[in-house]
């Protein structure tokens, strides 16, 4: 019996990205991006020194992989085009080898009943553009819009769901505040300019897509981390949590869906005298070109308390000047990733989109659990028994179901990720997939217990 039934045509699938899966081979003519470069410079920063050229080899194994997606119940799958693969210099000449690859790959998905969802930017700035500042440089916005338009032209007949960015706050946090992405600066002024340019680039790409009238939809994928105050009855805690929410969620959610930056964020940025460079017409472009569809990535909540520790002025202003992170006692943890597991967070996000964002059409575009050392769970048939992952997905899906029952316009659920892949500086430390990838055996794939389970869930449209 199916107790939790999902709406008809619900999207069941998973998400991945080009830089984390494709790999590089000789003759693919891919250009360098910031990950290729950073790994060349500082391989020791990457877990076990595994770099982005390895990944899970989708580039050569995608046909086999699409069959595995089919076996694990996918009716949809998201990946990203690598900007540096399609346009090795970021602008200019198109790499025809890349065109042939992506077309064959998207066709293979379609031929197997899996709709490709394609994201245009997953943390992978082409190196040539980064050398001029990357997202800091206004010219990157134009380059991005050209790249996006090239993608719509080349693949728009095959792809009907586009996304402008995946988690655009992450390059801001990682690259310009907290040092976990190249170029590892700590500079709030730059962070604000980068975030502004990403927002503008998204609106301009949406505009370009709509002008082509290609009969598809375009959206953005945001990692929304609900910001919970330590004590809901404590005004200072609530205020601090609201500011954290403005910095990390509403900075992209509001412009993407409402076409405007949040007033409380603007106020802070003005007070700090850190307004970005805005050109005439920009704000109108952002206002008029909002998303058709919102992808929501959810892993963990953010727990906040009023600022108690002294403000650290070493690097100039930081978001953390306005709040402290709160360590909730006895919280449920994923110890491998160090992230709290709080299933109800997914329901709170979906309720928020219903109540405060016009009940925009949305789907869960990432949710998942990275676990280290999964080989210890291999059974006598060689299958990893990842019951913890089944439990994790089930517990989140129950809350998604509840939100849908209450009227939220959520049309799908994608797990991160299809098969174990390369997780940035964590490389292959934590495994997230429905399908195991054995690096020691040339990337041999084996469906995990959760993959078999998911295929049943998809078949029954619930559980
Ligand atoms: C998301 C990213 C993914 C993926 C995932 C897991 O933030 O969109 O690219 O990597 O998180 O996180 P991590 O790989 O850091 O463990």
Image (tube, helix red, strand yellow):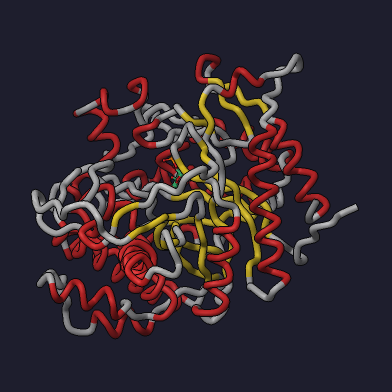
Of residues 423 and 76, the one drawn nearer to the viewer in this rendering: 423
- Residue 463 placement (x, y as % from top left): 80, 51
158 to the left or right of 282? right
Can I make out residue 182 in this image? yes
Q: Extreme right residue here?
A: 1
Q: Is residue 267 left or right of residue 101?
A: left
Residue that appears at 37% across and 29% down:
53
Instruction: Looking at the picture, tell me which residue is in the foreground, 92 or 81.
Output: 81
Q: Is residue 334 above or below residue 239?
A: above
- Percent x, y for residue 403? 66, 68
Q: Residue at x 49, y 58 (%)?
A: 155
Q: Quadrant of residue 11?
A: bottom right
* Residue for point 68% across, 76% down: 407
Can you see residue 151?
no
State the residue in front, 316 or 353: 316
Q: Quadrant of ligand 1?
A: top left
At a point 37% along the width and 54% down the height, the residue shown is: 121
Q: Name the spot of residue 8 as percent of width and height, x first.
A: 77, 66
Res. 192 image quadrant: bottom left
Percent coordinates x, y for residue 16 in the rendering: 51, 45
Left or right relative to 33: residue 411: right
Q: In this orientation, which residue lies closer to the viewer: 12 or 94?
A: 12
Vertical placement of 9 versus 63: above or below? below
Image label count: 0
Quarter of the image for residue 286 reads bottom left
């Amino acid at each position: 019996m199916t107790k939790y039934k999902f709406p008809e045509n619900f999207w069941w699938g998973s998400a991945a990205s080009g830089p984390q899966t494709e790999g590089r081979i000789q003759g693919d003519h891919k250009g360098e991006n910031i990950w290729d470069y950073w790994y060349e410079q500082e391989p020791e920063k990457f877990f076990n020194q595994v770099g982005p050229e390895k990944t899970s080899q989708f580039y050569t194994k995608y046909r086999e992989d699409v069959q595995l997606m089919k076996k694990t119940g996918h009716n949809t799958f998201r990946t990203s085009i690598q900007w540096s693969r399609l346009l090795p210099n970021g602008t200019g000449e198109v790499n025809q080898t890349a065109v042939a690859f992506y077309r064959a790959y998207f066709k293979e998905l379609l031929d197997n009943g899996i709709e490709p969802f394609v994201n245009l930017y997953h943390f992978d700035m082409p190196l040539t553009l980064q050398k001029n500042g990357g997202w800091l440089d206004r010219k990157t916005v134009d380059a991005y819009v050209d790249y996006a338009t090239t993608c719509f032209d080349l693949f728009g007949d095959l792809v009907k769901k586009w996304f402008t960015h995946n988690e655009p706050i992450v390059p801001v946090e990682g690259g310009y505040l907290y040092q976990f992405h190249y170029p590892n600066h700590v500079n709030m002024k730059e962070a604000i300019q980068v975030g502004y340019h990403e927002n503008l680039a998204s609106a301009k790409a949406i505009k370009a897509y709509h002008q082509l009238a290609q009969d598809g939809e375009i959206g953005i994928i945001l990692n929304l981390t609900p910001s919970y105050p330590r004590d809901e009855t404590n005004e200072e805690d609530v205020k601090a949590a609201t500011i954290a929410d403005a910095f990390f969620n509403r900075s992209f959610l509001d412009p993407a869906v409402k076409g405007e930056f949040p007033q409380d964020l603007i106020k802070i940025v003005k007070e700090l005298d850190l307004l970005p460079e805005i050109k005439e017409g920009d704000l109108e472009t952002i206002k008029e070109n909002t998303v058709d569809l919102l992808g929501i990535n959810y892993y963990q909540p953010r727990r906040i308390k009023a600022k108690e520790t002294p403000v650290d002025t070493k690097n100039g202003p930081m978001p953390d000047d306005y709040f402290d992170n709160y360590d909730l006692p006895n919280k449920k943890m994923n110890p491998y990733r160090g992230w709290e597991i709080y299933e109800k967070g997914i329901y709170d996000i979906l309720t928020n989109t219903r109540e405060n964002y016009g009940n925009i059409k949305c789907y869960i575009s990432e949710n998942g659990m990275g676990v280290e050392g999964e080989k210890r769970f291999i059974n006598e048939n060689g299958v990893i028994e990842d019951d913890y992952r089944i439990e994790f997905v089930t517990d989140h899906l129950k809350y998604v179901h509840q939100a849908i029952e209450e009227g939220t316009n959520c049309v799908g659920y994608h797990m991160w990720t299809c098969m174990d892949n390369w997780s940035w500086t964590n490389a292959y430390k934590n495994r997230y997939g429905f399908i195991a990838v054995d690096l020691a055996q040339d990337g041999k794939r084996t469906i995990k217990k959760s993959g078999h389970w998911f295929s049943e869930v998809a078949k029954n449209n619930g559980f």
